Structure formats: structure tokens, C-alpha cells
Image (cartoon, rainbow, N blue to C red):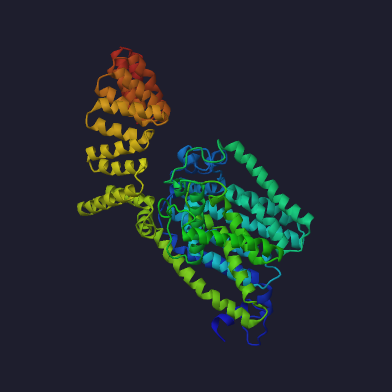
Amino acid sequence: MPLYNICFTYFFMKKQNKVSLIKPSFLVKNRNFIAGIFIFLFGFSLYINTLNNDYAVDDLIATTDNTFVQKGISGIPEIFTHGYYYGNTKRNDLSYRPISLVSTAFEVQFFGNNPKTHHIFHTIYYAIMCLTVFLFLTQLFKNQHFLIPFLIALLYAAHPIHTEVGANIKSRDELFAMLFLSLSLFSILKFHFEKKIIFLIMTILTYFLALLSKENALTIVAAVPLMFYIFTDSNKKQILFYSGIFLLLAGIYFLIRFSVLDAMTTKGKIDAYQNALMAANNFWEYFATNFVIMGKYLYLLIFPYTLSWDYSFNEIPIVNFSNPKALIFLLLHLFLGAYVIFGTLKKHSAAFGVAFYFITLSVASNFVITIEATMGERFVFIPSLGFLIAIMSGIILIFKLDLTNLKHRNLLIIIFLPILILFSARTVARNFDWKNNLTLYSCDVKSAPNSARTHLTLGNEYRIALQKEKDELKMREFYLKAIYEFEKGLQMFPDNSNGFYTYGYLFYVVGEKDKALEKFQKALICDSTNSVVMIYTGIVYTEKKDFANGEKYFLKAIAADGKSPHPFNNLGYIYGQKREYLKAAEMYKKCFEVGKKYEALISCGKSYRNARKDELAIPIFEQAMQIKPADKEPVKHLFEIYKNLKNEEKMLFYQKKLQEN
């Protein structure tokens, strides 16, 4: 008997065998527990090679660059009262996902800022999520053979398209959403079958946590009635009751979201660089291209080999319905939609899988609302479970497999075991690509060669590598590679202010200031309100001693966005160089008010002294002493001021302060 037959016969099948080290009855009785442990360990082992990975892509949003997370446990109240991106960008719209940030805040509190720690916990959470998916599937297929949920759970754990979630710390929002979502569906099914109130409580708790993890958990409200109709004998009242629980929790979540966020969707304008669909000239091009994107998702779910962290403009070009791909994928999705209706009436589990896929992908599909991305592998993290349910159930239905028959079970294993091995190998290999930004971007610029973003981000990563490198030959190599990638990306998408800015910043760091100014000017042509570019343009002019142009651009930056301390600080420097000390002091004071920069406070006091306004400098230095009592500089200035004023009492007081350790 082949090895796989022995494993499944002895450990998971009801088949008697006289030669057995462990009684089959024990294994059958405890098969869910044994299988669950196996799936947990399997899920963990798939991502164990990410433990030494660094931060990648937007991990910093949820870790080192998030002010709330950096406060540890004390930052949790602010996490719950602000949008997901507020702690990083002060942006309080679009997303409310506190749970994943709370988890990273706990990790920072007890283990500090260590990517390895975050990856260890992330991998554990992934393994737990694989287990909860299995638990849900065992209830979903309660009246069918155990092999079905077991194989689906293994394939789900191993699917390579999940590496963006499994290897990317920021994607913990997706991971937690699936973890708690599958637990909530498991719990509501358990409540239906066993009528124990504890499972109803678990349903309420876990679904609410799923909603607080990521808003795409809202979509499951539409899948719950289908689930009960197809997989159980529930009557209409029961289905309405179960669906009502999820709907009520979704409503509560919306009320919280509405009270916390300034806007329910993005407040800014979405451009074609963020979402290539915005380059469509009309409704028909938008929808035709979107069906090509939907087809791309299906292709990657079937053949997940060439993967990328980004699919931005112009990786998937704008097309109309004269394009064969658009027409084929439109017809395919219409066929699948029709099958959902037909299959639901026939109570086909495959129909539920297709419906689950469509429903959970709906928010990120760009059909319901336009989001800030063309497509992303993370967006099918939850929908892919529906895809696998549909594939498994479809094969059993088409080939009329009877899984009480050993030969049919063997056939199912023969079909899916090679796929499982290939999926696992590709996942482990893909994890190495996620080691750090340079590794990932270098790899994916080949996978998505027509994406302007992949080239521009790689160019910027070469710039960062150049700044860290000390070997001149390697610096030169990074410099030339960065130029190539910037030129390539900007050729694809020339109307890109941030692209020209990062290109100009490359020239700035290597001291080629005229080239930097050229790129900064092009950035401002693309977006005349880009205050960051204005600031750096002012910095370059200031370093060239062109104070008039420096002042002009810093004032423009303040007019565009007065929330940054940098233009005020630089204006303080310019006015100081021009011996306009009172104006310098006012700018430094503004800098401190906006950015709480201690150094600006000291510079403000010095400027008042240079203007011979010691009486104005005194409160400034006294304030500085309160902020940093150990710093001797403000004490020294106060000593000198009171010495000049011949105030012996105050002079002696600050002299004593200077002598203190």
C-alpha cells in the first residue's frame, strides 16, 4: 500500500486494520484534534524562513513609523480612537483597523522594535489562522467526508498567493480578519448544530474582532444566509436570525467607524498611478479592464508562480471590450454568476465557494467602490478560500466521487497532493523574496516589468543602498542602477510628482544640486501643491546661498501645508544669515509650535540675543530648561544674560546650575 494511503487510512479514515501501533478508533475519534495540530505546524513551517526577514514594503506603517504603536500599551487608546493611518500620516479617513496595530504595540512594549519578533508572532498568528480555517471547514462540511476540509485547509495554508500576507507584517490586518472571520463562522455553525450559548457568544465576539481587523469582513454578511441554506437544513427564521446577528454587528461597527473617521472613504483624489483604472477614458474601458484584472486574480489562484507586490500602472493596460481577454473574462464571470444562482438552488457546495469568492472580493474588486490600488494579492487572501472550496467541490461533483470509496479518496489525493507540494515549494521560495525591500523590488521588477511603481520604488531603494554604502565602486553601481530605474519608471508614468521628487533626491544626496533642482522643478510641474518638493527645492537654493529663492520656496511650502516644521526652521536660518534676527526668532518659534523641535527653541533664544532682545530670550531659555533640564546650553545663556543685566542673584543661581552634574 502506498505511503499516502497508509497515512490517511491509519490516521484519518474509518478503516479497520489488524496491524496498527495505535488503535484506529482512537485516531478516528480524535482526528480533528490531530489534524488541527498538523495543520497548525504545517502553516508555521511554511513561513518559518521569514523569521530572519527585515521590514518590507509598508511594514513601517504598522511598526517603527507609527507613533501610537511606538508608545506600546499606552498608545492603545489612541489606536482605538483614530484611523489606521493616523499614527503614521495624520490621515484619519478610509480605514479603521485597530486590532492589528494593538498587536504590534504589545510586541513593541515587551520586545522593542525588532523585525524578527514581529515576524515570529506573525508566523504564529498565520499558523493559528490556518487552524481556525480548518475548524470552520469541518463544520461547513460536517455532513461530508473529513478528507474535504482537511485537503482544503492544507491547500489554503500553502497557497503561494498568500505570501504577501504571511511574509508582510503590515498585512496582519488581512490575517486577523481571516482568523476571526473563520472563527465566527465556525462558532455560528457550532451554535446551529449544538445549540450551546457559548458558541453564540463566541460568534459575536469573533466577528466583531474581524470587523475591527479589516473592513472587508463586512462582506461576510451576504455569505451567511447562503451558507446556512446550502449546508444545513435551517428554516427561514433560523437563517434570518443568524444573518441578523452579523448584520447587527456590522451596523455597530459602522457607527463606531463613522464616529472615529473624518471620512468613510478616501478624502483625496485617486490618480492612475495609484489605480490604473483611473486612466480609463470611459465607463466601458473601466469595466473591460476590470474584468481583465478579475481574470488575472483567477489566473494567479490557479498558477501562482509569477507573483508581485505591485500591479500598478501600466502592468495591466487599459482595454475595451474589443480585447479578447476582456470579453473572455466577462463571459467567464457571467457564467460563474449564473452558476451561483443555479447551484444555490441545487444546494451545491461549489456554488457557495464561487459566491464566497465574489462576495468577499467585492469591496476590493473596484466594481463596488474605486480603491487606491489596481489589484493586490492580499485582496484575495479571504476570497481564495471560496475558490478552493469551489475547486474541491467541483471536482467531486464533476467526477462523481464517492469518498466512502477508498479508490475515490485515493484519486482525490492523487489530484491534490502534487499541487500541495508545488504550492508549498513556491511559498517557501517566495518568502525569501520578502527578505527586505531591495530583494523584493529587485525580484518583482522582473515579475511586473510594466509597472511604473516597481521601477520607481526600486530606484529609490538603490538610492537608500547608496547612502549606506562606503565602497565607492558599489556606490557608483547603485547610483547608475537608480538612474536607470527612475528613468524607466518616469518614462512609463511621466506625470508623477513624487517620482521626480525621489529622482531629484538621488542627485541631492550625491551633491549634484543643479540636477536635483531640475527634477524638483519637474515634480512641481506635475503637482504645484507638493509641499515636500517645495521644502527640498528651498533647501537646495539655501545651500547654494541663493537665499531669495530659498525663502520663496519655503514660504510657498508654508502656504501649501503649514503643518511641517521644516520650512519655518529653514526660514529661521535664512533670516539669521541675512541678520534679520527678529524675523529669524519668529520663524524658530513657529517651528517649535508646529513640530516641538527643541533645537528650534534654542535657536529662537539665540536669535533674540543676536537682536539684542535679551528680555525676549529669557522666557524662551527658561522653557527650554523645563523641557530638557539636563541640557546646559539654555542655562549658559541665562547665566550670560543675567550677568550682562548685572542681576547678581539670578547670575549666581544659574552659575550654580552650570556647576551641577
Most foreground residue, 78 or 356? 356
Could you tell me residue 395's position as x and y percent?
60, 73
Q: Residue at x 28, y 50 (%)?
A: 482
Q: Quadrant of residue 394?
A: bottom right
Q: Quadrant of residue 623?
A: top left
Q: Quadrant of residue 432?
A: bottom left
Point out the residue furthest to the left here.
473
Could you tell me residue 213's position as x and y percent?
57, 49
Point out the residue furthest to the front here.
322
Q: Residue at x 54, y 51 (%)?
A: 364
Q: Is residue 432 above or below residue 205?
A: below
Q: Is residue 494 above or below residue 381?
A: above
Residue 656 visible in this rendered orientation of the protein: no
Q: Is residue 410 above or below residue 474?
A: below
Could you tell me residue 149's position as x and y percent?
62, 68
Residue 438 visible in this rendered orientation of the protein: yes
Q: Is residue 566 left or right of residue 210?
A: left
Number of numbered discs on residues: 0
Quadrant for the N terminus, please: bottom right
Could you tell me residue 608's position as x and y percent?
32, 18
Q: Is residue 630 above or below residue 379?
A: above
Quadrant for the C terminus, please: top left
Q: Is residue 424 left or right of residue 555?
A: right
